[in-house]
Amino acid sequence: MSTQSNASAESPASRTIAAAGLSPTYPMRWSLQRELWENRSIYLAPLSAAGIGLAGFLIHLLTKRHILAGLGSAFQLQELRELTVPYALVASLIMGAAFIVSIFYSLDALYGERRDRTILFWKSLPVSDLTTVLSKASIPLIILPFLAFAIVVAAILFMLPVNMVALAGSGIGFGQLWQSLQLWPSAKMLLYHLVTVHILWYAPLYAWLLLVSAWARRAPLLWAFLPPLIVSLFEKLAFHTSYISNLLLERLGTVSGAGGAGEATGAGAPLMPSPQFMPDRFFFLPGLWIGLLVAAGFLALAVRLRHLREPI
């Protein structure tokens, strides 16, 4: 009788708990797999952006094939540099798609599970609120930036041989195109930009969006962007200062190279090597460490709210 009761106690849930207890990283790995399974836009959007960019690149080569074939050996350096522009455009398209997905994913990450009431099921599993929030924060902070980098590299490896076929008979050799692209320095610059800007510098932004996602009962997009705008306008009207708006623009302005961290992060067009490659300066920026502390506080509040909030 006792043997039968012990056998019945070995339910799938208990085996899952036992497996989770054997491996401390199991809940995090399982949670990340869950996010990738539930949110296919995480990888479909950058891949779709890459497909659109490559399609445009191929059309560009087809429409310019007569010009490319007629370059000959007397081509100008400027003409060769123009051949590298599509590479930067495709990289920008992929990174832009990953950034947009990061914004909307963060806004819906904790709000969505309360809206469709699946939070009741997920809370019944042996996964803590801390693990859940950190796994969701890992998507915009780790998964999407490195996924975008991998897709950019794959796209370039496809574009380069196609470009050489289109240049056959033009007098431009592989070495000249390779030297003009400067792929190895450009790849290092792109990776550095993704780590410094899209991960470290934008960490407070994604943490704030996750906090709003955990708190808002409806319209998280409005709650995420309207309060900072109202506070900035109030400061301008009441005190004739713009400290808050300047702070927000500095945090977001590094996309186009503006802001206090623009030079240190080498912000600008992807795959365009820049002399502004100064990690020693970036890691000594006070705004970086203050922002990371603020991000940690936002995530801690999101964990607490996820524990307290009920389904909508």
Image: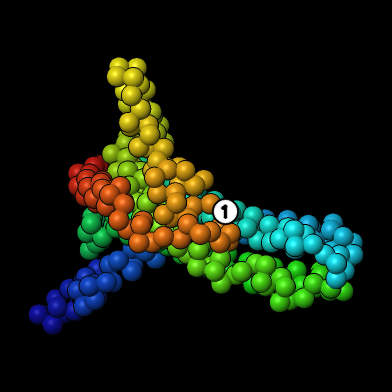
Q: How many marks?
A: 1
Is the residue marked by circle 1 packed among few (<14), some (14-19), or many (20+) residues within 10 Å? some
Question: Left of 257 or right of it: where is 92?
Answer: right
Front position in the image: 130 or 199: 199
- The picture quadrant where one finds residue 108 is top left
- At horizontal 32% and vertical 43% (from top left) the residue drawn is 208
105 and 141: which is toward the camera? 141
**One can see residue 284 in this view:** yes
> Which residue shows up at 30% across the image and 66% down it?
28
Helix, strand or loop at label 1? It is loop
- Three-letter residue code for mark 1: Ala
- Residue at (75% x, 62% y) in the render: 77
Residue sitting farthest toward the left: 2
On the image, the x and y values in percent for residue 229 come to 38, 28
Look at mark 1 in the image and give the residue it sits on. Answer: 269
The answer to whether one can see residue 138 in this image is: no
Identity of the residue drawn at 56% across and 72% down: 184
- Name, please, the residue furthest toward the bottom: 3
Up-down relation of residue 183 to residue 298 (above or below)? below
Q: Work out which quarter of the rendered image holds the C terminus and state it.
A: top left
